[in-house]
Each structure stands twice: as C-alpha cells, then as structure tokens.
Image (cartoon, helix red, strand yellow):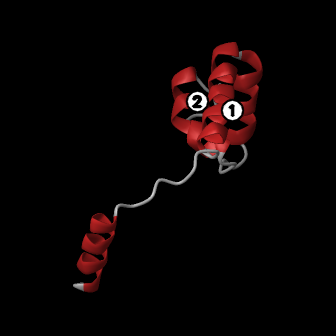
C-alpha cells in the first residue's frame, strides 16, 4: 500500500485490523483520515461494531454429546 489516501476498497481490506486495534502508524492515521471523509465507510465500521456487539450477547450453543465424543476421540487418537 502506498502513502496515498486509503481507498474504500483498501479500507474494507483493513476493517478487521482496524476494529481490533491492530493497525500500526502510519496506516492507522490514514484509515482514520479516510473515515473522517467517507460517510459510507464510517457507516460500515459502525455496522460492523454493532454486529460484533450483538453477537457477543448471544448465549453459547451447546455442543451435542455425540459430536463432543467424536471430537474427543479424534483428538485422543492423535
């Protein structure tokens, strides 16, 4: 990636790292500059954060006993 302005396509590729606070300078500054200028990408990141927050409120799904036994057997065999 060059030192030029971040494009929307580049932002989408960097979104996960941005949301997880995994971007280093100077790319973080360039991404934040893009977000300040691009309502579409700012909305996209807000939607991603809301989705992650909502998914975090779901109760865990129990693992069926048969699957649990099969996985435990497969791991024990290694």
Q: Secondary structure at mark 1?
A: helix
Query: What is the total number of numbered labels drawn onto the structure image?
Result: 2
Alpha carbon distance from label 1 to label 2:
7 Å
Quarter location, residue 44: top right
Mark 2 crowd level (few <14, some 14–19, many ≥20, 10 Å Cα)? some
Q: Position of residue 50 (x, y in %)?
A: 67, 32
In the image, taking residue 27 as reference, residue 8 lies left or right, namely left
Q: Looking at the image, is 29 positioned above or below residue 76?
A: above
Q: Position of residue 69 (x, y in %)?
A: 29, 74
Q: Is residue 43 placed above or below 13 in the rendered structure?
A: above
Which residue lies at the image location 51% right of the left edge and 24% below the top edge? 9
Please state, as top left, top right, bottom left or bottom right, where the N terminus lies in the image: top right
Residue 75 coordinates in the image, percent (x, y): 29, 79
Asked if disc 1 and disc 2 are in contact, CB closer than 8 Å, the reply is: yes
Q: Residue at image x 70%, y 14%? A: 39
- In percent of width and height, residue 31 lies at 68, 32
In the image, residue 28 above or below residue 36: below
Nearest the eye: 44 or 68: 68
In the picture, which quadrant includes the C terminus?
bottom left
Q: Badge 1: few (under 14), some or many (20 or more) residues near its Cα, within 10 Å? A: many
Side (left or right) of 69 relative to 63: left
Q: Quadrant of residue 74?
A: bottom left
Using the image, tell me which numbered label, if any, was put on residue 31: 1
Q: Residue at x 33, y 69 (%)?
A: 68
- Which residue position is annotated with label 2? 11
Helix, strand or loop at label 2? It is: helix
Which mark, by number, is residue 13?
none
Task: Residue at 74% x, 16% y: name it.
Answer: 37
Q: Which mark sits nearer the N-terminus, 1 or 2? A: 2
């Amino acid at each position: 990636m060059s030192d030029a302005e971040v494009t929307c396509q580049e932002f989408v590729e960097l979104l996960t790292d941005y949301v997880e606070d995994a971007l280093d300078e100077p790319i973080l500054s360039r991404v934040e500059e893009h977000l300040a200028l691009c309502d579409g990408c700012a909305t996209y990141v807000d939607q991603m954060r809301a989705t992650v927050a909502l998914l975090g409120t779901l109760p865990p799904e129990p693992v069926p006993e048969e699957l649990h036994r099969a996985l435990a057997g497969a791991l024990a065999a290694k």
